[in-house]
Image: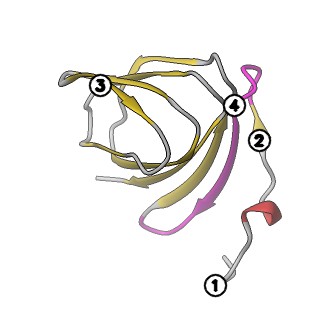
Amino acid sequence: MIPHCVDWTEIPEEVASSGVGKRVIAGEGASLVMVRVPAGVRADRHSHPHEQFVQVLSGSGTLETDQGARAFGPGSVFHFPADAWHAARFDSETVVIETNLPG
């Protein structure tokens, strides 16, 4: 059972070889993911089979979509419909919160 109130630091961080760290809260109909991305990382063009919202808490970089390239920073919010491609470059260490909604 997922506690009703949890601190992100209580959730174990899984760190990939790229240095990207993720903390996941999996619900029944959605997931919430805190992602910590080191400066200099690039997320190559990709898509997801689910809808996704991303809120930038800290850091900076450039988001690329079929709508063009746009700089992002704290307070930026991304919305990706299912199967929409996107890519990103992270200029400084960046922390985002992803909300993933399966179709």
Residue drawn where x is 66% and y is 76% of the image: 2
Q: Secondary structure at mark 3?
A: loop
| Labels 2, 4: front one | 4
Q: Nearer the N terminus, badge 3 or badge 1?
A: 1
Residue placed under numbered mark 1 in the picture: 4
Sequence-first disc among 2 and 3: 2
Q: Nearer the viewer, residue 80 or 56?
A: 56
> Horizontally, is 34 left or right of 97 in the view?
right
The residue closer to the viewer here, 14 or 58, is 58
Q: Position of residue 66 (x, y in %)?
A: 20, 21
Q: CA distance from mark 3 to mark 1?
A: 33 Å
CB atoms of marks 1 and 4 within 8 Å: no
Mark 1 vs mark 4, foreground winner is 4
Q: What residue type is disc 4 on?
A: Val
Q: Is residue 38 magenta?
A: no
**Residue 41, image quadrant:** top right
Q: Which of marks 2 and 1 precedes in the sequence?
A: 1
Type of residue at label 3? Trp
Residue at 48% from the left image edge and 69% from the top image edge:
28
* Residue 92 lies in quadrant: top right
Q: Which residue is mark 3?
A: 85
Which of the marked residues, 1 or 4, is nearer the chain's N terminus?
Answer: 1
Mark 4, residue position: 20
Q: Which residue lies under the disc numbered 2?
A: 14
Query: Where are the magenta residues, as a range?
Result: 16-29
The amino acid type found where label 2 is placed reads Glu
